[in-house]
Image: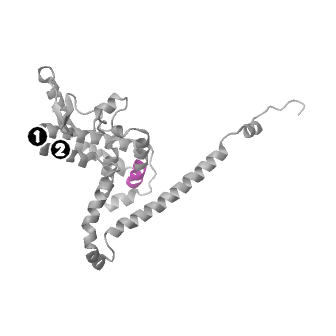
Amino acid sequence: MAPADPRDGRQAAVNGAEPYLGAGAPFVNPVSDGGLRRFQPSKGPHGAGPRQAWDQMHKAGQQRPRLLAEISQTALAADPVMLYSSLHVLDAMRRSHLAGSVMFGSDAMVEFYGGLVTAMTAEQVLQRLGAVFHPQALFDLDRLLREYARSENLVHQARVLREGAADRQASVLHMLQMEQRFDRMQGYPAQLRPIFEEIVVPLADQARAGLGFALHQALEAADAYHARRTAQLDEAMDAFEHASADLRPSPTRTSMCRWRPRSRQE
């Protein structure tokens, strides 16, 4: 049996976990077409199924402006930069405990929020930098981003159904559009790096003359920085684990710390 497509939300829902992007529109089935994924409407009674699917997709498109406004309002009511950092941690914690098919698209929405923050004016961000806010703001932001992702997913499904998949080229285009929206898997940098190096390495001399360094050296510096930070994180985690081990209850420590009522003679 072929492995489940991580973008197939219905399979994740069957396994008991609600997919990040939702199960999709009702009466719309993902089908395989020569190894590619596409959608086709299933047949409901008297055409009710397709109508319900189109209505849900249309409403999803109308909700996006409102959701964008609420995301910005939630961010500016707190600290947009701190929320971005906290959102990264929250998403990493979930993805480490849930299957990739369930959390597909979540890291793309963290990146999407980062783009919204960079689009804010410097005055807006600096004014809220370091502001104290209630932790609920993080969960409200996460919920809004998820709602926006589901709306965007339904809008994409509507486009696929509207344009159809008359040939393989159209199916490939739809797949690339889906990946552009939601695919931020860990293998992506490994695919892009060779392409980047093929482009910039021949330009090394011109880059050194104009910038003072070759463009491919930026990735080498990033690798060195990442290795250093990873080593520091490993050291911190080792120290934390050792400290936690020292604090674990032992039979000797428990007997010493156990409370014993004093007798009248004492």
Residue designated by label 2: 174
> Which image quadrant is residue 30 in?
top left
Q: Position of residue 131 (x, y in %)?
A: 44, 54
Residue designated by label 1: 163
Badge 1: few (under 14), some or many (20 or more) residues near its Cα, within 10 Å?
few
Q: Main secondary structure of the magenta part?
A: helix
Residue visible at 15% across and 39% down in the picture = 160
- The span picked out in magenta is 78-87
> Which image quadrant is residue 120 in?
bottom left
Q: Are marks 1 and 2 in contact (CB under 8 Å)?
A: yes
Colour scheme in use: one colour
Q: Position of residue 7 (x, y in %)?
A: 28, 39
Q: Is residue 175 magenta?
A: no
Q: Position of residue 144 (x, y in %)?
A: 32, 42
Which residue type carries mark 2? His
- Disc 1 on helix, strand or loop? helix
> Which image quadrant is residue 222 in?
bottom left
Q: Quadrant of the N terminus?
A: top left
Q: Quadrant of the C terminus?
A: top right
| Chain-order first, disc 1 or disc 2 | 1
Extreme-top residue of the structure: 45
Residue visible at 28% across and 69% down in the picture = 201
Q: Position of residue 80 (x, y in %)?
A: 37, 53
117 horizontally vs 199: left or right: right
Which residue type carries mark 1? Glu
Whether residue 13 is situated above or below residue 66 in the rendered picture? above
Whether residue 47 is situated above or below residue 103 in the rendered picture? above
Residue visible at 28% across and 74% down in the picture = 204
**Label 1 to label 2, Cα distance in Å?**
9 Å
197 horizontally vs 34: left or right: right
Whether residue 226 is situated above or below residue 51 in the rendered picture? below
**70 vs 230, nearest the viewer:** 230
